[in-house]
Amino acid sequence: MAKGVNKVFLLGNVGKDPEIRSTAGGTTVASLSLATAERAKDQQGNWQDKTEWHNLVAFNRTAEIIRDYVKKGTQIFVEGKIQTRSWDDKDSGQKKYRTEIIVNEMSLLGGGAGRGESTGGGGGYSRSNTSSFDQRPSAPAEDFADQGITDDDIPF
């Protein structure tokens, strides 16, 4: 059988404060929901936002980072894989399913303030940071002047 690929990239905002727990073996586990949004025109030509909710699970060091720095509204970029697990419901005996994204890598974006730090009332969401993956301070234009880059070098 051919090898398959199971890889997911998501950029969105955390829907509520993450739930943190530890397994009997001492592994830290973080569970959180992530909202992604896309915009499309409806039949009348009006723009409509469609939000999709994703269940994320992170383990070990990534879960600890989530515990310390992520809260409702924080914008994050994650790389992971899709996993569906099943179990028998204790009350009804029915088989239940849950599809989750197992987080392998995560980047904090747009207002990843830790617990107890003020984010300016934005719930961890900072409008000025939503359009860029690079959260380093911008370098002044004169830092690039000695590199010989001209307007002709820009492809657009």
Image (cartoon, grey):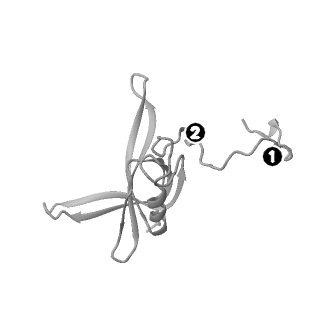
Q: Residue 128 carries which label?
A: 2
Q: Name the one closer to the observer, 112 or 107.
A: 112
Q: Is residue 40 visible?
A: yes
Q: Is residue 7 visible?
A: no
State if disc 1 and disc 2 touch (CB < 8 Å). no
Q: Which of marks 2 and 1 is nearer the N terminus?
A: 2
Kindly give the residue lying farthest to the bottom in the view shown. Answer: 25
* Mark 2 neighbour class, 10 Å CA radius: few under 14, some 14 to 19, many 20 or more: few
Q: Name the one closer to the observer, 13 or 69.
A: 69
* Residue at x-position 83% and y-position 39%: 150
Image vertical order of residue 135 relative to residue 4, above or below? above
Question: Residue 128's x, y, as percent?
Answer: 57, 39
Name the image quarter holding the N terminus: bottom left
Under mark 1, the amino acid is Asp
Query: Element type at marker 2?
Result: helix
Under mark 2, the amino acid is Ser
Query: Circle 1 sits on which residue?
Result: 143
Residue 104 vs residue 22: left or right?
right
**Label 2 to label 1: alpha-carbon separation:** 23 Å
Image vertical order of residue 73 relative to residue 89, above or below? above
Residue 19 vs residue 94: left or right?
right
Image vertical order of residue 152 relative to residue 101, above or below? above
Residue 148 vs residue 17: left or right?
right
Question: Residue 70's x, y, as percent?
Answer: 46, 54
User: How many labels sit on residues?
Assistant: 2
Kindly give the residue lying farthest to the top in the view shown. Answer: 44
Q: Name the one closer to the observer, 115 or 146.
A: 115
